[in-house]
Amino acid sequence: MTQAASDPWPEEPSTETDSKTPPAGNRFLTVLSDKSMRAPLLWSIVGRFPLYLVTLALVVFATSRGTGYGSAGLLLACYSLGGAVLAPIVARRVDVHGQTPLLLLTGVVHPLALIALVCMAPDARLPQLVCASVAGATIPPISGSVRSLWSALPTSGREAGFSLEAVLSEIFFIGGPLVLSGILFWGTPATALVVGGVLAGVGAIGFATTQASRDWRAEETESDLLGALRSPGLVRLLAILVCAAVSTGVFNLALPAFAEEHGSAGSVGLIFGAWGVGGVVGGLWYGSRTRDWPAERTLAIGLLLLSALTALPLLAWDNWSIGLALALGGLVYAPVTVVQYELVARTAPSGAITEAFTWVITVNVVGTAVGAQLGGLLVGAYGTWAAFVAAVAALLAATAVAFAVRHRFTAPAGTPGSAHPDPADGHDLPVDVGR
């Protein structure tokens, strides 16, 4: 991957001394003071903040017009599947043609599709589903684009950038629903959809106009049908992530059910918020530390610890105790996400970095959908305890795969499918590689 802009990050020394290495606590400050990344980061926040807002607003919008939850779920499914199916294709075009054209295109089409959805008559079911699918398919590829910029930095900048990404993901998770609540207090669900679409569009267009985005180019490589999936290391990582996403999907169904069982369905927002707060704290702590362990070992151990903490909701007796249990689990969730980003950057084939990051989003959508269905069946048949057990089992499966393939996340430098090697990363390369 070529450098997106001027590089303020000094290479980390490969000798025993670390006298030239910036203090670990300064990493976030260095990221925020980097002029080449400041504008892309700002616009990426604007464009991605409404992601959860739009998802929730679609359900509220559909039910506010007299349709049942079945119709609302179908509308949300079309939106989610549109993004899951077409997002890797859009990302591949980004890798081929650069970030600017696709960001501008999706920055216009996405809000227009949501506006068209809002303007349709309530009984125009098929056109609404089409608009929802188009809106989902044209979600601006901001996440993959900004992570591609982070991956072009040397080790210190890349790790700090990915840590910041994990923290921002938790903030979006908390902030989106809060913004939706504020809009609904003053306006309507239709207003929330329009505001969310416009914010995403403005963020995408603003991001596309930054110098870093306009200068970014993927390495030239021969295109093929598999694209980023031609990397065995990336495929192994995606197998781990889809198992972990099943756990998240189970919780998405089990937590509202638990809140309702224990007296207040309205507390579910606070429960999810506690989960997100734990993630923010864990991400800030992890991102401020210098790490010596190889990323693949950190991922496996982190998933094992996360599996143990995910079992804590089985001991919860009310909404407050389960909020505390989820906050403790969130402390590990964000660090695992950071390592995930680092491994994506390492295993992505040359010329397919944006697509590789987008496949992570796709498998998360698929795994979450499977987990939600599984969670619904288990809650209905046995209760929330069974769903929590299934969530732990899914994470244990992810952990088992992570330990089994932990020596196979990289390929020798210079071969197809190898990562973007960094001299400072040599200590992370396992002996058994490239098979």
Image: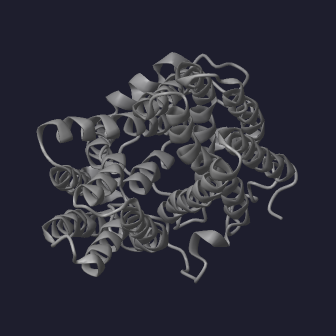
- Outermost residue, bottom side: 225
Q: Is residue 8 visible?
A: no
Can you tell which quarter of the image residue 67 is in?
bottom left
* Residue 433 locus on image (x, y percent): 82, 57
Q: How is the image coloured?
A: one colour
Judge from the rendering whether residue 269 lies leftward or rightward of residue 210; answer left or right: right
Tell me if I can see residue 124 in this picture. Answer: yes
- Give the number of callouts: 0
Compared with 420, 41 (above or below) is above
At a point 59% along the width and 25% down the height, the residue shown is 322
> For the point 86% across and 51% down, which residue is it?
404
In this rendering, would 396 be left or right of 50? right
Residue ID at (16%, 72%): 120
Q: Is residue 34 above or below residue 249?
A: above
Residue at (78% x, 48% y) in the render = 402
| Direction from residue 185 to residue 385 in the image, left or right | right
Between 116 and 86, the one nearer to me in the picture: 116
